[in-house]
């Protein structure tokens, strides 16, 4: 058996089969040329591929330095391959998904759940996303640009999946405030201020799809679904979304005396989420279970959900047009575009689709003499080239999501959140920081 395992033809056969399966999965048969390299490595050995090692070292052993270099190179290649095609680590940075996912949760994201997408910018520094460590320089170069391509996966995005995706409005960013939408900043401060005030906003950068910031939200509507929000209740195809224990909204809590901070700790309300409206009133994000528990406090007189008024237009809400007077609690109805579906275009509904047409699907769009012109031709309809999704945070009043920036294109989808492998509470100290009840917990159960 040992002789078989060490036989060069056996080694070549195993590696060649694995490589061939990967090429078939990738569906790019130019990579079959790599079989010649594998054949030479294991059989003919004409080329010295491991140039950092001596070909015939004394006593058959490399120096310690070379062994370390060899191990590092193998680890970088293996880890990069796994990260690109199979699974990637992700950290929850904000409270937008609480109480389903908490700040300080460390996740693994499955690329194979929906199929990994090949990099648009393959030339990049390993293990970093878009910026070099301790630097403001890009971690990638755009000498090679590849079109969107997704390999086969285990399935498709379903309603209520927790999905990691590239921020749709992240094509342009102000470097000093990368966590905010450039387009929201333009609406708030004006383009001239944004581009001239580098001290506050930093350089204005453009990024390819695969180098935009990663977000995590729950997919509440898939292609073809119609969604609507009525007084805070999400309806998908006319039916209320399935209730989950982690959903929370902002409430005004009125008391006769201050609430003991330890009581808020027991409820799981982070320090950063505790707003004192005045000495006897608090604004707190709460789940249904937390509301019931708070109502039992002897010093609490009222717990009232804070909802925006129907018909009050919030100019920051998608599509940022007064013809759609929507807000976070009252939105739609709106149908999510599906690949191959056709929509009739008018000047009134164009704000809903102009970013899809011009940015996501790369068409020349303009309005001339009250007519819509796409790629130089008058257009009264448009057929979508990709599927789109609607993503929302479970922390409904503290989440920058599709209500603010609209649809998420399929080419922005990274993968499905699989399980939590570590969870740290930033408000605690030492070993008490570790949330033991969340370790190795599957996301589908949340």
Image (cartoon, rainbow, N blue to C red):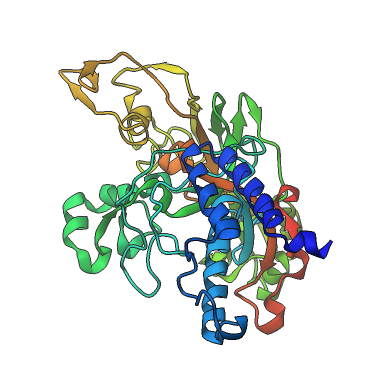
Using the image, determine if residue 337 lies above or below residue 98: above
In this orientation, which residue lies closer to the viewer: 83 or 369? 83
Task: Locate residue 351 relative to residue 276 in the image: left or right.
Answer: left
In this orientation, which residue lies closer to the viewer: 367 or 156? 156
Using the image, determine if residue 59 lies above or below residue 161: below
Report whether residue 284 is seen. Answer: no
Task: Locate residue 10 relative to residue 144 in the image: left or right.
Answer: right
Please give the name of the residue rendered at 31% of the width and 13% of the height, measured from the top-left corner.
380
**From this viewpoint, which residue is outermost toward the right?**
1
How far from the left and from the top, in percent, is residue 431? 71, 81
Using the image, determine if residue 197 lies above or below residue 434: above
Report whether residue 55 is seen. Answer: yes
Using the image, determine if residue 113 lies above or below residue 142: above
The quadrant holding residue 114 is top right
How far from the left and from the top, in percent, is residue 208? 35, 48
The quadrant holding residue 129 is bottom left
Task: Locate residue 248 relative to residue 174 in the image: left or right.
Answer: right
Q: Give the position of the N terminus as an image quadrant.
A: bottom right
How far from the left and from the top, in percent, is residue 40? 54, 56
Please give the name of the residue rendered at 27% of the width and 47% of the height, measured from the top-left corner.
187
In this orientation, which residue lies closer to the viewer: 232 or 417? 417
Number of labels in the image equals: 0
In this orientation, which residue lies closer to the viewer: 318 or 266? 318
Please give the name of the residue rendered at 35% of the width and 41% of the height, measured from the top-left corner.
315
The quadrant holding residue 427 is bottom right
């Amino acid at each position: 058996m040992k002789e078989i395992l060490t036989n060069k033809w056996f080694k070549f056969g195993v590696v060649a089969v694995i490589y061939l399966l990967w090429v078939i999965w990738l569906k790019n048969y130019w990579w079959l040329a790599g079989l010649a390299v594998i054949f030479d490595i294991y059989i003919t050995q004409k080329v010295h591929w491991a140039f950092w090692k001596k070909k015939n070292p004394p006593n058959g052993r490399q120096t310690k330095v070379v062994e370390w270099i060899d191990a590092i190179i193998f680890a970088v290649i293996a880890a990069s391959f796994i990260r690109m095609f199979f699974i990637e680590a992700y950290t929850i940075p904000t409270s937008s998904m609480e109480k389903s996912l908490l700040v300080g949760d460390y996740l693994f994201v499955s690329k194979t759940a929906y199929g990994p997408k090949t990099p648009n910018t393959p030339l990049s520094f390993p293990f970093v996303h878009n910026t070099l460590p301790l630097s403001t320089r890009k971690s990638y170069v755009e000498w090679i640009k590849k079109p969107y391509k997704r390999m086969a996966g285990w399935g498709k995005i379903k309603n209520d999946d927790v999905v990691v995706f590239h921020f749709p409005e992240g094509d342009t960013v102000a470097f000093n405030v990368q966590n905010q939408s450039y387009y929201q900043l333009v609406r708030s401060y004006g383009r001239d201020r944004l581009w001239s005030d580098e001290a506050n906003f930093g350089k204005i950068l453009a990024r390819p799809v695969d180098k935009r910031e990663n977000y995590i939200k729950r997919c509440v509507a898939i292609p073809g679904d119609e969604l609507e929000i009525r007084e805070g209740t999400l309806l998908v195809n006319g039916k209320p979304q399935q209730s989950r224990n982690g959903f929370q909204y902002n409430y005004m809590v009125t008391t006769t005396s201050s609430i003991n901070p330890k009581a808020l700790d027991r409820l799981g309300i982070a320090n950063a989420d505790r707003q004192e409206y005045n000495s006897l009133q608090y604004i707190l994000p709460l789940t249904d279970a937390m509301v019931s528990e708070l109502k039992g406090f002897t010093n609490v007189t009222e717990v009232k959900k804070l909802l925006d008024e129907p018909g009050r237009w919030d100019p920051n809400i998608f599509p940022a047009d007064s013809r759609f007077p929507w807000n976070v609690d009252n939105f739609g109805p709106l149908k999510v575009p599906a690949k191959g579906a056709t929509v009739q275009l008018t000047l009134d509904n164009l704000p809903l689709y102009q970013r899809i047409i011009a940015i996501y699907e790369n068409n020349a769009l303009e309005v001339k003499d009250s007519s819509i012109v796409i790629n130089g031709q008058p257009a009264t309809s448009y057929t979508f080239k990709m599927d789109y999704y609607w993503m929302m945070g479970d922390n409904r009043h503290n989440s920058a999501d599709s209500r603010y920036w609209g649809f998420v294109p399929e080419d922005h989808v990274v993968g499905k959140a699989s399980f939590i492998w570590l969870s740290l509470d930033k408000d605690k100290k030492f070993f008490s920081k570790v949330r033991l009840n969340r370790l190795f917990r599957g996301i589908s159960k949340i």
